[in-house]
C-alpha cells in the first residue's frame, strides 16, 4: 500500500470511529429528551438522526443551508444542533414545553440553522428549491440540503418543485 492509501484509510477509519461515538451519544440524548418531555416522534427522529448528524458534522460547509421538510422529526435536528454546540442541555430540557423555542415542529427565526418553519407536508422541498434558485441567481456559494419523509411525496407541490428543480438545473440542491 502506498503512503497516501494508508493516510486515506486512517482518515476514513478515524471518521467512522468518531461518527460511531457521535451517533451513540446523540441517540442516547434524543431518547433522554423525549423521555423527559413525555412526547415526540421517536421513530421518525431515529430514522433521520444518523444522516442529519453525518451531514452536519462531515459534509456541510458554513455557506450551506439545511431544511428539515419532515418537521415532525425536529427532535433529531435539535439533537444535531446540540451536538455541534448550538443548543445546550438546558435548551433540550425545554423541548415541547409551553412557550419554548424547541417546539414540536421547527420554528424559524431564532437560530440561523433553522431557516424554514416546516411540518405541513409539501412545504419544505418547494422552499428548498427557492433557496437553491436564489443561490444560483445570486452566484452564492453553498448548497441547500433538504431532508424529506416518504409520505411527503404524496403531495403534488413536491412533484411540481422537483420538475422545477430539474428544469432550472438546480445543482446546488440536494
Image (cartoon, helix red, strand yellow):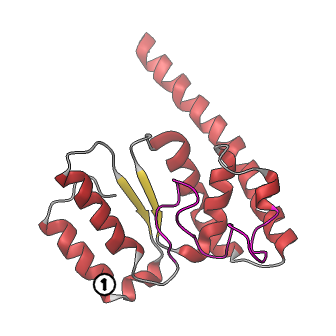
Q: Could you say where residue 15 lies in the image, as x and y percent from the top left?
A: 57, 34
**Residue at x 57% of width, y 64% of height:** 48
Q: Is residue 94 above or below residue 139?
A: below
The part of the image, by quadrant, that contains residue 29 is: bottom right
With respect to residue 143, does 95 lie above or below? Answer: below
Q: Which residue is mark 1?
A: 157
Q: Which residue is located at x 75 percent, y 68 percent?
A: 95
> How busy is the neighbourhood of tag 1: few (under 14 within 10 Å), some, or many (20 plus)?
some
Regarding mark 1 in the picture, which secondary structure is present there?
helix
Residue 82 appears left or right of 56: right
In the rendered image, residue 50, in percent from the top left (x then y), is placed at 59, 55
Considering depth in this image, is 89 or 25 the residue closer to the camera?
89
Residue sitting at the far top = 3
Query: Which part of the image, by quadrant, shows the N terminus?
Result: top left
The total number of labels drawn is: 1
Lateral position of residue 35 relative to residue 109, left or right: right
Where residue 113 appears, as percent x and y from the top left, is 52, 54
> Residue at 47% of width from left, 61% of height from top?
115
Residue 126 position in % (x across, y down): 32, 74
The region drawn magenta spans 93-118
134 versus 86 height, above or below:
below
Query: Is 91 within the magenta?
Result: no
In what quadrant of the picture does the C terminus appear? bottom left
Question: Residue extending furthest left?
Answer: 167
- Magenta stretch mostly in which secondary structure? loop
Amino acid at each position: 500500500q502506498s503512503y497516501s492509501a494508508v493516510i486515506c484509510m486512517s482518515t476514513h477509519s478515524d471518521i467512522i470511529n468518531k461518527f460511531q461515538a457521535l451517533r451513540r451519544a446523540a441517540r442516547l440524548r434524543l431518547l433522554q429528551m423525549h423521555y423527559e418531555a413525555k412526547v415526540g416522534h421517536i421513530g421518525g427522529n431515529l430514522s433521520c438522526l444518523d444522516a442529519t448528524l453525518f451531514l452536519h458534522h462531515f459534509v456541510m460547509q458554513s455557506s450551506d443551508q439545511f431544511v428539515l421538510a419532515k418537521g415532525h422529526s425536529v427532535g433529531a435536528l435539535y439533537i444535531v444542533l446540540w451536538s455541534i454546540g448550538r443548543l445546550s442541555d438546558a435548551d433540550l430540557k425545554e423541548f415541547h414545553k409551553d412557550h419554548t423555542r424547541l417546539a414540536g415542529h421547527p420554528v424559524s427565526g431564532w437560530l440561523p440553522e433553522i431557516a424554514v418553519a416546516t411540518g405541513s407536508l409539501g412545504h419544505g422541498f418547494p422552499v428548498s428549491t427557492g433557496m437553491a434558485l436564489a443561490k444560483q441567481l445570486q452566484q452564492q456559494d453553498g448548497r441547500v440540503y433538504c431532508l424529506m419523509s416518504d409520505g411527503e411525496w404524496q403531495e403534488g407541490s413536491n412533484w411540481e418543485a422537483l420538475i422545477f428543480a430539474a428544469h432550472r438545473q438546480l445543482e446546488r440542491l440536494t
